[in-house]
Amino acid sequence: MSSLVDVDLLGDMKKFGTVDVSACFSCGNCTAICPLADNDGTFPRRIIRLAQVGLKDELLSSKELWTCYHCGLCSDSCPTEADPGEFMATARRYAIASYDRTHLARTMYTRPAVGTAIAVGVAAFFAALMVLAGVVGVLTMVTRIGRHEGVTPRALLVGAPALRRAWRAAWSAVGIESIGQRRYREDCKDDMPVEPWYRRRWFIHAMTIWGFLGLFAATMLDYGLSIIGVKETGTPIPIWYPSRLLGTIAGVMLIYGVTMFMINRATRYNRAATKSQASDWLLLVLLLITGITGFLIEVALYTPSAPAWGYWVFLFHVAVAMELMLLLPFTKFAHAIYRPVALFFYALAGEKNRQTQDA
């Protein structure tokens, strides 16, 4: 069987990485030191040779290309510093672009500016879709409630007294009620009053909310520390670091709250859990997966040699977390934005009643 030689193969592959294997004289040292090489997998020497002589089809058909984990032993021991480990990584990028019929992968790898623009564009599209759906929903809700309650934008925003009322109502809605759970704790009595505090519905609800908000804050704090150069994203830091400590505590709170919600629904523990819809379970499952995979990532980071499964857990964690956020306006999670708005109008009505009584 004859093989076609592509004289431009090596030059084309260089577009996918800075590696240059022209110094390689096929001594075989890289294959000899590779712990994964055997009689059926003589990489990276064989892959390098295929690229040097232009055997594109053979290179792209090689299973050996994907069995390398880029441990770096071959590059460290290469007598000519040809960097075979990086060459294997480059070859995999080239293979991905070659397998892709849309040519999008080639653009992403060989034109970083355009690739970045595409990635940002895709992320911006989905983010804009989520934000637009949320904003439209909130505006629709505000318009309906405002019309019903006789509240106009002018009455909310024009004049110092109106601004003070709006601020007090916003603090009551977000700080006191949504986060502090005041009325849930004091006025909304459980149908099982003899239960201990840690089984109370308000406490389970609070643990879920505080846990989610804490994880969000820890993520933002970790990202901020990486921006100012305190640490690199994804690198292990001591458990007492603010972002790590906050994330750990918040993760425990979230998992506890969600687990208790699921147990209550599965056993129909109280009136609120007697009937469950698919949307109830969807939110709980996504939240639980987000919390558990977050802890597994933390375990992987603190393991002496980072296990390969940690990367897969990280990808799964990010995918579920992104799905949770993207679906926010369309699922039961939407009550996280609609309830504070309703509580704002409730508190605003209370401010008006107090003002009328004082007058």
Image (tube, rainbow, N blue to C red):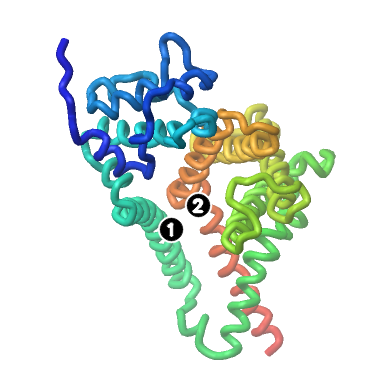
Image vertical order of residue 333 relative to residue 100, above or below: below
Please give the label number shown on residue 134.
Answer: 1
The quadrant in which residue 351 appears is bottom right
Looking at the image, which residue is at 60% across and 52% down?
Answer: 232
Residue 285 vs residue 219, the one in the foreground:
219
Query: Where does the C terminus fall, quadrant-wise?
Result: bottom right
Q: In the image, residue 331 lies at what x, y percent?
A: 47, 45
| Left or right: 159 as drawn, with respect to 347 | left
Which mark is first along the chain, 1 or 2?
Answer: 1
Looking at the image, which residue is at 50% across and 28% down?
Answer: 74
Q: In the image, residue 250 lies at what x, y percent?
A: 70, 48
Looking at the image, which residue is at 16% across and 10% down?
Answer: 1
Q: Secondary structure at mark 1?
A: helix
Q: In the image, residue 358 lies at what x, y percent?
A: 71, 87
Mark 1 burial class by Cα count in 10 Å: few <14, some 14-19, many 20+: some
Looking at the image, which residue is at 52% across and 81% down?
Answer: 156
Residue 299 vs residue 42, the one in the foreground:
42
The quadrant in which residue 225 appears is bottom right
Residue 351 vs residue 57, the one in the foreground:
57
Please give the label number shown on residue 27.
Answer: none
| Left or right: 103 as drawn, with respect to 35 | left
Q: Is residue 336 visible?
A: yes
**Residue under label 2:** 334
Image vertical order of residue 172 relative to residue 19, above or below: below
Q: How many marks?
A: 2
Q: Are marks 2 and 1 in contact (CB under 8 Å)?
A: yes
